[in-house]
Image: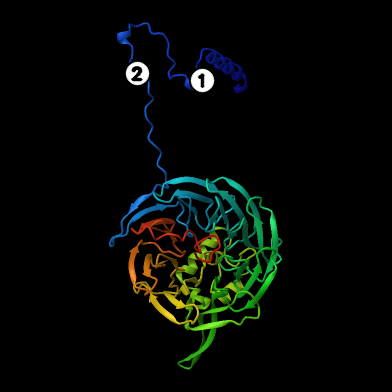
Amino acid sequence: MKRGILPIAAAAAALLWMAGVSPSQTPYPPQVPSPYPAQYQPQAQYQPPARPRPADPLEPVPFHPREGRIGGWKVTIPGDRPLATPAIAEGKLYLGGGFGSHEFYGFDAASGRHVWTYHTADDGPTAAVVENGRIAFNTESCELEILTTAGRPLWKKWLGDPLMSMPAMADGQVYMAFPDSRGRGTYYLAAFDLQAGTETWRAALPGEIITAPVIDRDRIYVATVDGAMVAFNRRDGSRVWQEARNATSAPAIWNERAFFSRREASQVRQGGVTSTQQTEVYASKGAATQASPVVDMGATQRDADYLDYGKRAQTASEARSQAYDASVGFAGANKGSAAMAPARANLGQASVHGIWSYKGSKPFVVNGRLYSSMGNTTQCVDAQTGRVIWSRNLRDARRPGTDDIVTPPSIVNGKVFVGTRWGFVYALSADTGDILWKVDIGEPVSFQPSIATGRVYVGTDRGSIFCLETGDPKDDGWMMWGGNAKHNGR
């Protein structure tokens, strides 16, 4: 029936064209000669009734905290899923819809206005990296995806299931870790051409990596969930060095040294009973060679119950992680290709969601000072001597628990910005650790904030994006997780 109508429509369009009126210009309803005198004819063309603009569920709403001078806006992502760190570039904010979602979004960074949505084939977009108009992120199941900053897909590649870390990017290459797709229990780090998607090189890994690769100069560094530290030449993937050091975070590279947190277990006897106490300490080693020794910063050592799965197993956060796993097909002991035993022993994590969201005590070095968060404490340490310059306990005493978590810090403009699982966002003095301001956003935060043009952006564990206007345009430059696409700070 529709085919029979087409010739008639084409003929009508031709007649209109000959009359000098294109179909798109035809008034509605069509004007015909009126039998009535001119004074009785309508003086204006017919206007169809205005239709109300449909409500966008992603519409930003003003945010005004109960106390304090810092306000802004809030956007709630459908699904109430845990959100990663937003990425900021070209005046826009880029963010996945959270663990288990199939959406990736672009928003106006100043107003929070929804700009575009891209639908992924697989679930669980990670935090994104952005460089030169290209966005790179991966889904937990199971693809690396590259989009333009306008939300147009360029290419994607199925790598393995699950993908629990995020990519890094530099010099037209994107780097990603993944499990062997044949289920042989092996892992790889690979480099891909950002424009074409072709694989440049692939190197074997001892296991799943923690959070993301870190790039500095001509090398790329990873820490694996079983505690290994590995450095590769990022041009050809050749291995520079590898050490088994119970590493518990991705490293920071500064002045040709690699800084990372690591776990130690000690025997404690109390009341006639001997038990194992997990501790965590910062360490460093020369970044260029295997021969350089690992040196602990003894003053940073502290008890680390958050790394002890025996103490975490019954916590509310572990129950939530297992529930998130079940929602994407990883119920119980079934975790796909993911080997949970090494992560459980070294990081205290035994779920896909737990490793996907785990950032540990990731340090960053700025002006010779190492800034980090361990458990409930944010601290500043002299990177050369290991001396603790200041330490700030940010625990909310009203909400005790084993999972006292403060995010890795974002450092700009002489300030240190962190979020907490108790729903606070802090700005601390980078020199003294004094609290400059704090905002109770009322939702737990597990991922590091982004900082751009006088605004602090955080994604929460309950599916919200908060933008906090600091009033200082110099609060700028920490544009995504790890500061930039290399994940090594500014």
Residue type, mark 1 in image: Pro
Tag shown at residue 143 = none
Q: Is residue 126 left or right of residue 427?
A: right
User: What residue would you read off at disc 1?
Assistant: 23
Residue neighbourhood size for the residue with mark 1, other residues' Cα within 10 Å, grouped as few (<14), some (14–19), many (≥20): few
C-alpha span from label 2 to label 1 = 20 Å
User: Which residue is located at x 32 percent, y 57 percent?
Assistant: 71
In the image, residue 65 sits, relative to residue 403, either above or below, namely above
Residue 149, x across and y down, in percent: 53, 48
Residue 175, x across and y down, in percent: 62, 60
Q: Is residue 236 left or right of residue 474?
A: right
Disc 2 or 1, which lies upstream in sequence? Answer: 1
Q: Is residue 204 left or right of residue 137?
A: right
Q: In terms of image quadrants, where is residue 393?
A: bottom left
Q: Which quadrant, please, contains the N terminus?
A: top right
Residue type, mark 2 in image: Ala
Residue 405, x across and y down, in percent: 44, 71
Element at label 2: loop
Q: In terms of image quadrants, where is residue 163?
A: bottom right
Q: Nearer the viewer, residue 329 or 261?
A: 261
Q: Nearer the viewer, residue 21 or 185?
A: 21
Tag 2 near tag 1, CB within 8 Å? no
User: What residue would you read off at disc 2?
Assistant: 44
Q: Nearer the viewer, residue 271 or 305?
A: 305
In the image, residue 209 sits, relative to residue 271, either above or below, namely above
